[in-house]
Image: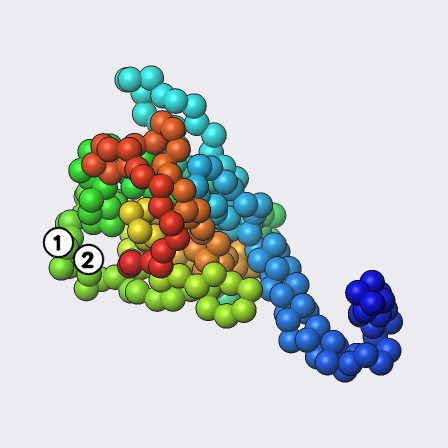
Amino acid sequence: MRITSVVTGLVCATLLTGCGSGTYESRMQQATIPYFKYRNEVDANLSAEWARDTLRFRVPKQFQEVLGGKPKDDERDPRQPEFLDADLPGLVAAWTAQIGIDTPVEPRQPGEEPRAAPLQRPTVQSYVYLLWNRAVKGSQGENFDLVVVNRILGGLGQSRFTSEGLASATNSKLVGVGDFKVEKRISQVGFRTEEIVDGVPMDIIVAFYQQRSDQVAMVYVVPQTANFSESIPKRIDLSIESLRVESMAAPVGVTPAGGEPAAPEGGGGPAF
């Protein structure tokens, strides 16, 4: 009897004739089809998943990882940003891309010959950085968000935030809301900078996520005039949404903030 009922169920699911086929089709429409539509959208806009230790992350499609070996004592990590007069704390990975930008077109003067169209749209070097408080030695990890933001501001020669100032400048929002997604709260702050990369004004977007004692910062450095075809705002949102922190002990060789080995953890909701 058990085998017969299983076979009957399979026949119903396969042939979609009788056996509640209308209900089955409805569930397909409500769940399966939207899921694959969402997955196709993500895969069309983000690179393959990057994974290391307990972190999982995807960057916008254009970006490629910057590979950097362990630097010597007198050398700087090649993944650190050249446009900052400071190192980013807890850096675990970096990516770079050439992003197309829009440039203003000067109007032709009366009688002037039409200008030839440029052969290639101008681009500017852009960056994504992933920072983790468990990769920070000492007490800096205790106020990881403030340390990260102030390191960026100090590296740009700008005034640093107090804790209260950062709280006022930070936008807190839920991402991953809806079916098929993992909902989490993100704290985000952004800066408009002067011509810090190749003479082009850039936006620096810093998004923080916390899961228990794990604090992760995603830093995006992109041109303010990025061409619409680059889909930068959409891809950054999907990239932020892709971050996952698996629940397990700190890996060997990574020291959590405070200098003590981390204990195994269970899952937990975001705190930011």
Residue at x 25% of width, y 50% of height: 145
Camera-side residue of 113 and 79 = 79
Q: Is residue 153 visible?
A: no
Instruction: Say above or below: 168 vs 218.
Output: below
Residue at x 83% of width, y 63% of height: 3
Residue at x 22% of width, y 62% of height: 169
Q: Is residue 69 visible?
A: yes
Q: Splitting the image into 4 quarters, where does residue 28 fall?
A: bottom right
Question: Label 2 belongs to which residue?
Answer: 166
* Tag 2–tag 1 contact (CB < 8 Å): yes
Camera-side residue of 61 and 249 = 249
Task: Indicate the position of residue 25 as horizontal and vertical percent values.
Answer: 75, 77
Q: Please identify the quadrant where the N terminus is shown.
A: bottom right
Amino acid marked by disc 2? Leu
Instruction: Say above or below: 14 vs 150.
Output: below
- Distance in Å between CA atoms under marks 2 and 1: 6 Å
Circle 2 crowding by C-alpha within 10 Å: few under 14, some 14–19, many from 20? some
Counting labels gives 2
Amino acid marked by disc 1? Thr
Name the side, left or right, on which 41 lies relative to 234: right
Q: Please identify the quadrant where the C terminus is shown.
A: bottom left
Q: Residue furthest front?
A: 1
Circle 1 crowding by C-alpha within 10 Å: few under 14, some 14–19, many from 20? few
Question: Label 1 belongs to which residue?
Answer: 162
Secondary structure beneath label 1? loop
